[in-house]
Image (cartoon, rainbow, N blue to C red):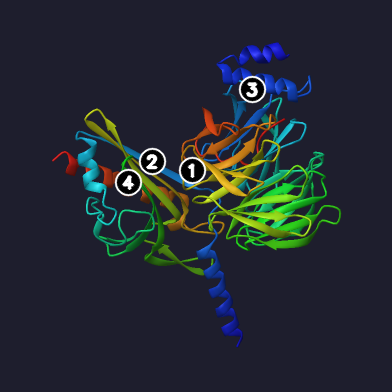
Amino acid sequence: MFSLNCHRTILGNKAVAICIATALLSTPLAAQPFAYISNQLDDSVSVVDTATGGVVDTIAVTGRPAGVAVAPDGSKVYVSTPEAKGFAVIDSKKREVIARVAVNDGTLGIAVSPDGKRIYVADWYKNNVSVIDADSLQIIHTISVGESPSGLVVSPDNRWLYVANRISNSVSRIDLKTLTVKKTAQVGTHPFGLTIDARGERIYVANVQSDDVTVVETARMKPIATVKVNMLPYATALALNDSRLLVTNQDDGSVSVIDTETLKEIALITVGTKPEGISTHPDDRHVYVANWFDGNVSVIDARTLKVIDTIQTGEGSRAFGQFMGK
Amino acid sequence: MKKIILFVSVLLFFFTSIANAHGPVRQKAEEKITINAPAAKVWDIIKNYGDMSWHPGIMSTTVKGDNSKGAVRVLTLKDGGTITEELKKYDEAKMSYAYKITDMSSSKTITHAGAEEKVPALPVNDYAASIELADKGGKTEVIWKAGYYRAYMNNNPPEEMNEEAANTAVKAVLETGLINLKKLAEK
């Protein structure tokens, strides 16, 4: 299994290094990590084999696919389709849409629980989050949140769901036992994408209008810092054992790198035009960025802070959410 | 009293929607042209952010600030409409700059879904664009890119404010501008 993977990755010293890192971190039977990139203007999802750095398949998904969430076991990929007012379920082995679920008017943000049992979908127009049973694909509950809910993230212990409310300038914390909003924190202007650390203690939310990132301590739901980044920060991802936060700056064509200890920006990496979705590879080192205007993906090495690869995907690559399989 | 409350809430609704929300799917436009003139000559024509006389659709330009981030220009169109744009990025060495529309006059008012809707001069929302030159061995390639949403910010847009209207209008702006720039530079 590994020798096969490694043969396919002998493209240079760096690629071999990735292969070794993957071999060390993944369990022997783990599938190759794939990145699922929604191409909103092409009505498709590109399947990127992160070992070879190539697109291995393109899946047709109508309804302007935007948000992406990969099931923890990698078997399913959930893609929000705002123009089809719901989301699509992709079988990652068959690489095709196996179900479509009608949810609401403006589905965008989407997330799946760490146990894979529930799917959460935010509705941009209806100001709520729908809770869907992943087996039956039935909506089991709908929770009112702030205005224009966007990014969603579930705590690693599967206890809380965090929602960035774009127009309300806030993040709601939803108790997943009672399915009610427990607390709301005011953040910067127009929060959009957000991520959570491995211990579930901090949330990093990108504020598209105030050009900064709010760091929220989850226990008290209080902002503990605001870090200035560049123009129109869109989404965030953590790497290197949560020591680095990477933020896509949509209007600057760059990614800001923040040291999470000092909470200072330590690098600004040029990527493509209009970078949007951002996710970290299971090796915890390589970070994938979807460049919406260019229709490609930049691969950043969080250690060297350099772009090591650019992969052509499709028109309007958005990939908003956790689009990386394990 | 009831009327006043209704009026205020309608006003609030308009205020929030105009200030914040947008359609679900961002659109893009990209136009390129190759000009038989050196890049320096083409750059000379477009480099002043406060002078857009090279575009045939623009009657006049006024500007506050110089060729650096934060400068604001107001374009007066030949049909009388105005578009206000803020300079977001300016790179002399790369011969490129990027800007955003911050305000527009409306070209007409329509009634849709029981509400009055003002159709902006360019039927878009949240519009950001960049223009850049590339030296192609004595010739110049000009690339003009724009990302934007349709003008209508809720579901079910009227045809004057849908994606097609936005795409058609933006493509025309970019195309006519580049054709005229080529004409001017090759003179």
Q: A193 left or right of A311?
A: right
* Residue on which disc 1 sits: A274
Q: Are marks 1 and 4 on the same chain?
A: no
Q: Residue furthest right?
A: A177
Query: Relative to B126, is B131 above or below?
Result: above
Q: Is residue B182 left or right of residue A297?
A: left
Describe the element under mark 3 as helix, strand or loop.
Answer: helix
Residue A35 placed where, x, y %? 63, 31
Badges 2 and 3, same chain? no
Q: Amino acid at mark 4?
A: Leu
* Secondary structure of the residue carrying numbered label 4: helix
Q: Residue B150's spot in the image, x, y percent?
A: 47, 53
Camera-nearest residue between A119 and A20: A20
Amino acid marked by disc 3: Ile
Image quarter in which the N terminus of chain B is found: bottom right
Residue at the disc numbered 3 = A18
Mark nearest the camera among 1 and 2 is 1
Q: Earlier in the sequence, mark 4 or mark 2?
A: 2
The amino acid type of the residue labelled 2 equals: Glu
Question: Mark 1: which amino acid?
Answer: Lys
**Label number found at residue B174:** 4
Crowd class of label 4 (few under 14; some 14 to 19; many from 20; radius 10 Å)? many
**Observer-nearest residue: A244 or A136?**
A244
Specify the subunit that label 2 lies on: B
| Label 4 – label 3 distance at C-alpha | 43 Å
Circle 4/circle 2 CB separation < 8 Å: yes
Report the residue marked by disc 2: B30
Quadrant for residue A186, please give it.
Answer: bottom right
